[in-house]
Amino acid sequence: MNVDKRKQLNGYHVVFLIQNIMIGTGMLSLPQDLSSMGYSLALYPLLFGVVASLNLWPMIWICSQYKNENIFGINEKLLGKWIGKSFNLFIVVHLTFFIAGIIDDYMNLIQTTALPEQSTTIPILFFLVVAIYIVNGGIKSIARFCMMAFFLTLPLLYFLRWAIEKGDLSHLLPLFNFNKSEAFEAFRKGYLSILGYELIMVYFPYIANQKKAYKHALIGVWISIILCFVVTTVSVMYYSEWQLEHVTYSVLHLFKAGELTYIERIDIIGITIWVFLVLTTITGYLWCAKKGIDSFRSKKKISHVYVITIAIYIILSMPFSKEVKEKIFEAAFQTSYLMLCWPIFLIVVHLLRKKQVQS
Amino acid sequence: MKFKKFIRAIKSGDTDKASPNTKQVTGAEIEETIELLKKNTTQINDVIFKKIPTNEGIVTMVYSNSLVEKMTMQVMVLIPLANHLNQIHQISEKIDPADKTEIISKLMGGQTLLYFHDANLLLSIDTYSASTRAITNTETESTVIGPQDAFTESLQVNISLVKRRIKNPMLKNENRIIGTESNTEISLLYVEDIVNKENLEILKKRLDKVNYPSFPDVSILKQLIEDNPLSPFPQYYMSVRPDSIVHYILDGRIVVLMDNSQAAIVCPTSFMDMFISVEDYYNRWTTATLLRMLRFFGFFLTIMITPMYVSALTFHPEILPYELLLNLQESRSKVPFPPLIEVLFIELIIEVLREAGSRMPAKVGQTIGIVGGIVIGTAAVEAGLISNILIVLVATSALLSFLPPIFLMSNTSRFVRYIFILSAGLFGLFGQMLALAWLLAHLLNLSSLGTPFMTPVIPRKAGDLLDGIIRFPTAFLKGRSGISRSQKK
């Protein structure tokens, strides 16, 4: 039994939290996002891994300076109450739109493949109910769910078998056939699919062994990166360059390459099992948004989860046109870059105001 | 006379050193108590007041006829009274006539009260000997290999069945009374140097808090002390097999036995324990592993098969290969209902069959086979109410639901299946996966006595995996399981 009730996340919890929150719908469209790179995109996830590992370091460093505070608390301490609180509110709004964006993405996918004759209004409602149920169990419950989701969805890798058989290894060469602007374009579009590790700034105070947190986080990041790498490599082998650029959700179509005598359309099973991966991502972000409101209002309440979920539901059911929606969500996704750079800014403030804050 | 010495000894407080202020009891006081007893038991016709002349003068004897057998009465009380009065000394206990509630509860507990008029003395002798059932073999949890005896409804017999298997002074049984109206006796069994003290503490605290009038069976107590009473899943193991209970006691769990209840409950229990039969340890490890896999994956299959049918036919016919789809459509060609209604209809009929089968007297039980098999199975298909492929699926899932060794678990799978069928009817495979996500999240959040319910899936220690879905050869199974958090490893 843990003596301190807050220190409830063990090493493997951290690994799987990081790993599973990173994998959401982004992975399904990863090859398309990177398509400006041509066939060279196969190796690109490894670059992401390096960037993410470097990016993790300032996050963990700033959090380990304030062992019992999450990012929201640190904001308030370093930037003063009012600026901190208003920025926290901004983060919460950003997270809310971010979650809405992921759900919208996934639900569109479900609608096109699994439920072509239904509107998504009610499925979203049920989806959110399940998400609330998991979030109410706390961060440890989310971590356990992440572990379960990982092992449940891992067998999906098997379905890549046929794509590998039919693919062409020679697509992988030459390795570095791209220019700077292509690489930048791919980075801007593709890096969003491996977001999720920044949430460690919120659940850092709950980690039991904070000294090893960086190591555990790295393991998590690299498991995801390797999975992404496998997916991009197989896509490059299977598709032509034109297909890579124009086939949406190309990973789903990889499943379609499968030939079983008793099941056709493995992609439907694949995309419905994907709900586990999306749920882990959503619940992770939802929990963090809840923590944001907790710190904004300076009290813990379960109702905060409901407030966010209702907001998400309203955003999703607004009668905007598809273009407007896409623009909003795109903005929310791009704002995430601010979150990634935020700890560096905090470190600067921390170094400047160190004595003031500690006194 | 020895008896006179004994009386003197008792009166001077020789035998009752624990209470120093023993006051002299007068005859009138006892007389008054007996009168009160008489008044209080006018409508309790089995309480008998008898005056017997003995060498020591008149003795009034009070006892409850239905809780004391004639033979016991003869041997324990009547013969000693007539011949060997000093024997009474050895087996009796002096009671204070002022403590009236105690006297009444002793009488209701089957003890015999003796009032020696001349000596002004009130004694009680434990003569409780209500008739019990003999030890027979179990009908609900039978196994092919292994001991065949099962618990009975008598607490004493059950404790003896456990104690004859663990001859160890560290095995403790703490008895306590529970139930505000029924005053039922329960017993906590554990091995003191193995059990986790924290678990014991939590369990005792929960038992202290229980405020419930009566306990016809231990399963009621089980529901009151569970971590999450709203969950459809049982969180404690329940068994009537002494060998399986002994296995868990030695693993460091706490067992609760209750008087008048055949089953015992084991706290804490993990999800995996629900799929483990004690017979697995008697079988060879290969057989045991095969059976455990069947039970464990059978649980998930039984809640998934029929929902699969619903979602495949309602939402995703393209998931099936052409030939299979053709086959299915052909068998469904006469069926007028949508798949959801069809499945609910036949599942409910199976429920009815099962319920009727368990309520029906054994002699008319054969009828169920005929009605279920021929009338419903064949005729329903011929009448075009359901497709025959569905019959196969439903029958398979019904059989699979009986695989868990704990009946409560198979009941749970029956209930959970309906959630899956309905969600499959709503959103097809997506709904099913959402339901599975809910189920897994629920299971992950459950705890049993504060320990995670899904322990072997999220192992507390690596050794748990040796005795999980795969049962390793017996030589590997020396360690205790992680969930019991035992003192000894």
Image (cartoon, helix red, strand yellow):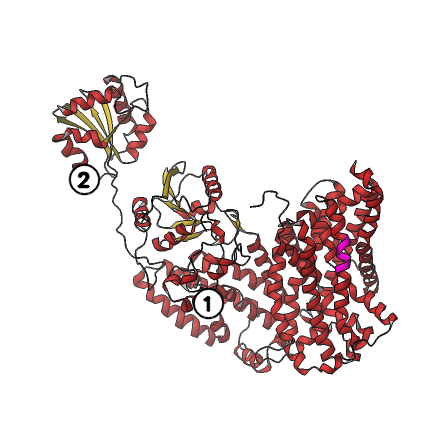
Q: Which mark is residue B347?
A: none
Residue ID for mark 1? B294
What amino acid type should be assigned to the residue bearing mark 1?
Leu
Q: Residues within 10 Å of mark 1 (few under 14, many from 20)?
A: some
Q: Are dots 1 and 2 in contact, CB under 8 Å?
A: no
| Vertical relation: B346 (above or below) B133 | below
Q: Is residue A357 above or below residue B329?
A: above
Residue at image mark 2: B70
At which x and y percent is residue A29?
A: 75, 69
What is the chief secondary structure element of the magenta stretch? helix
Q: Quadrant of the C terminus of chain A?
A: top right
Q: Is residue B393 left or right of residue A228?
A: left
* Residue A122 visible in the picture: no
Magenta-drawn segment: A53-58
Residue B166 lies in the magenta-colored region: no
Q: Chain of mark 2?
A: B
Does mark 2 fall on the same chain as mark 1?
Answer: yes
Q: Dot 1 falls on which chain?
A: B
Image height of A187 relative to A145, above or below = below
Kindly identify the amino acid type of the residue bearing the numbered disc 2.
Lys
Q: Residue at x 45, y 62 (%)?
A: B351
Count numbered badges in the picture: 2
- Image location (x, y in percent) of residue B89: 20, 29
